[in-house]
Amino acid sequence: MAGRPRVGVLALQGDVREHAALLGELNVDVLSVRNERELSIIDGLVIPGGESSVIDKLSRLFGVAEPLSAAIRAGLPVLGTCAGLIMLARELSDGISGQRTFGGLDVTVQRNAFGSQTESFETDLDVPVLGSTPVHAVFIRAPIVTRAAADVTVLSQLDDRRIVAVEQGNVMGLSFHPEMSGERRFHERFLERVRTRLG
Ligand code: GLN
């Protein structure tokens, strides 16, 4: 149908299907993005969770890393979850040797920040911009934001104040996986950006 936003999911590695399924319920056309041509026809992009070092390598191999960085700088709305947040960070700590990111968020992100003792956990988060109903968040070998520039909006913090959700302009990054707990509000917020930009 003409006029429906075309939303891409970066489909190099990770939980692509979960994001595609959720987006498919939100009245948009969903496309897999693996190369520059596919990137050029979308109105917004979701970067899934998975393994950021693999997403980094494959994105460079397929020639999509540079054009994607440029598209983000040019205002493409992007939502990244977990490894997707890592890929959006300007600076990375505890990356593998030579690991790069696309950028988009002026933050430092620490990979695997909860250590080997805590592979995964679930908790309820307050996210004031989404209203008073808490977000049930699933964290899997999750990163955290250890530095955020002054113009980055912190959307949510754990009880110990560690930052797990941020937004800067057209870009939103989450440490956890809303697509795994049926949480739609972050995707809806991202789609508001997409529709606003389409005009
Ligand atoms: N630890 C992973 C990484 O470094 C991220 C985990 C996830 O996306 N669930 O990319």
Image (spheres, helix red, strand yellow):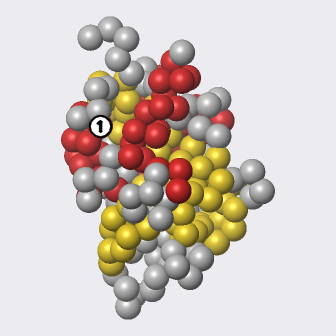
- At horizontal 37% and vertical 33% (from top left) the residue drawn is 8
Q: Where is residue 96 in the image (x, y as percent from the top left)?
A: 52, 71
Disc tally is 1
Circle 1: is it few (<14), some (14-19), or many (20+) Cα within 10 Å?
A: many
Q: Position of residue 98 (x, y in %)?
A: 58, 64
Tell which residue pokes out farthest to the front in this image: 132
Instruction: Find disc 1 in the rendering and name its residue.
Output: 23
Tell which residue pokes out farthest to the right in this image: 150
- At horizontal 37% and vertical 85% (from top left) the residue drawn is 118
Tell which residue pokes out farthest to the bottom in this image: 117
Residue 81 lies, with reference to residue 12, above or below; the image says: below
For the residue pair 150 and 62, the one nearer the viewer reads as 150
Question: Is residue 176 toward the left or the right of residue 153 in the image?
Answer: left
Q: Quadrant of the C terminus?
A: top right
Residue 51 in view in this figure = no
Residue 11 in view in this figure = yes
Residue 177 lies, with reference to residue 115, above or below; the image says: above
Q: Does the residue labelled 1 lie within 8 Å of ligand 1?
A: no
Q: Position of residue 116 (x, y in %)?
A: 39, 87
Question: Is residue 128 toward the left or the right of residue 92 in the image?
Answer: left
Residue 5 lies, with reference to residue 113, above or below; the image says: above
Tell which residue pokes out farthest to the top in this image: 2
Q: Quadrant of the N terminus?
A: top left
Kind of element beneath mark 1: helix
Q: Where is residue 171 in the image (x, y as percent from the top left)?
A: 57, 43
Asked where in the image residue 119 lies, by quadrant, the reply is bottom left
Q: What residue type is labelled 1?
A: Leu
- At horizontal 32% and vertical 8% (from top left) the residue drawn is 2
- At horizontal 47% and vertical 50% (from top left) the residue drawn is 130
